[in-house]
Amino acid sequence: MSQETCAEVKKMLKDIRVLVPQLEDLKKTIDSGGDIHKVKEDLERFKKVLHKTKVLRIKLRLWEERSKIYQRMSEIGNKFLRNKHAHLTIGELHVLYTKEILAPDIDIFDEEVFGFTNYVNNEGDCVGRLEDLRLLRRKGGEQQMKEDYARIYGCRVDQVTTSLGDLYNEDKNIVVFVGDVSLELQEQKLPETLRNISGFFSTESYYEEHIPEQLDYIGGSLFFNYVEGVWPKIPTYVGQHVQLWELVEIPEWGLEFSEYVGGHLNLLALTTVSSESCVFPKVVGGDFSSPRLLSVGGVVFPEYVGGSMELASLESIGEDQLPEYIGGDLMLGCLKSIDGVQFPEYVGGDVYLDDISKDDRNKLRKQRPDLTIEPTP
């Protein structure tokens, strides 16, 4: 933990200690019918302290998750120094092959994403360290890597492959494919046993039978350009970006997105979505872009967006729908009113409210002085 974060934690604890007796005094004032104006002022001050502590708690939770992974990486590195064929626990294998590193307050560019988002702290480049560990393990040979994946998924070693020929061979029953998959022909069919694609997965024309029901992990990006029939099942974890170019509306049978998207989630054509038909990811490590979205019908957006959030066409949104945390900008250029809108606890960039009146923007600035509201005034 950095010195700056340590200082923030100490200040939070100090503020809370001061707050407790003051809250007791406030209760006595309310019970005795004291000065209502003083009560309002005290409540406003308490709300600001609680807001700051909640934002810090979010950051601490993310820091704790990353630090646990980094600690496990250090343990793996020490084992590799002693023996490149070192025996790893199942937990260590998951860190090495199926973990993403989430990072707040940074810009995520394509070249910086390698199946997990970029994270740099005082201890060094965490993503680079993880990639170094993977390279060290590969020095043990392809067989070592296959044995590792087989242990993770409880399958045979011959069900892990780097060969596209094996992947499309129905008799092989492949569980893990190490590499990229690009489907170009309808005849290309992935095995129903497939659970992990370590690289990216793309298809120009999606057909229902293209996606195995058990596929739950994609280390790279997911691209669907054109879809025939129904929309696909989205795997639980996508390490990089999810691009659904032609998705205009969620079909009536619904669509459940990945729980975790390490990079950007781009829904550039989507216009309508409802809570009955759609469940968004809990975490988007990069940008959430849906610039044509007009109606949200009660849907809850991700809890955490590491980059910016673009909802440039949305005219209204209800309470408790926006994320708690947005690392970049929040673009709500067509929003007509701030009434009933619960803005995120933290926005690392600016909040764009072009269609809101100047008076309402100033009102929001007073309510949430921590937010940078654009345009000014």
Image: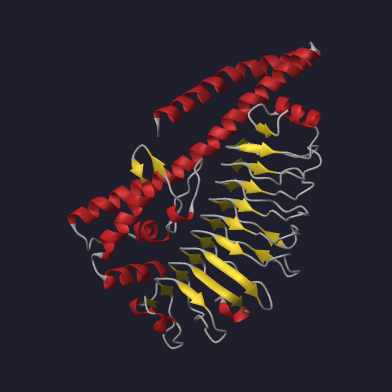
Front one among 314 and 377: 377
Q: Residue at x 53, y 25 (%)?
A: 12
Visual colour scheme? secondary structure
Query: Residue 14, how many percent across, how many down?
Result: 52, 20
Residue at the (72%, 24%) spot, across then down = 366
Where residue 42 appears, as percent x and y from the top left, is 70, 17
Residue 91 seen in render? yes
| Vertical relation: 301 (above or below) 250 | above
User: Which part of the image, by quadrant, shows the N terminus?
Assistant: top left
Residue 204: percent from left, percent from top: 58, 75
Residue 90: image quadrant is: bottom left
**Can residue 88 be seen in this snapshot?**
no
Residue extending furthest toward the front:
376
* Quadrant showing the C terminus: top right
Position above or below: 169 against 86: below
Task: Give percent across and percent down for residue 60.
Answer: 49, 37
Q: Is residue 49 left or right of residue 294?
A: left
Image mark count: 0
Q: Is residue 69 positioned above or below 224 on the image? A: above
Position of 96 with respect to 329 (left or right) is left
Residue at 52% across, 84% down = 188
Between 209 and 373, which is closer to the camera in this rendering?
Answer: 373
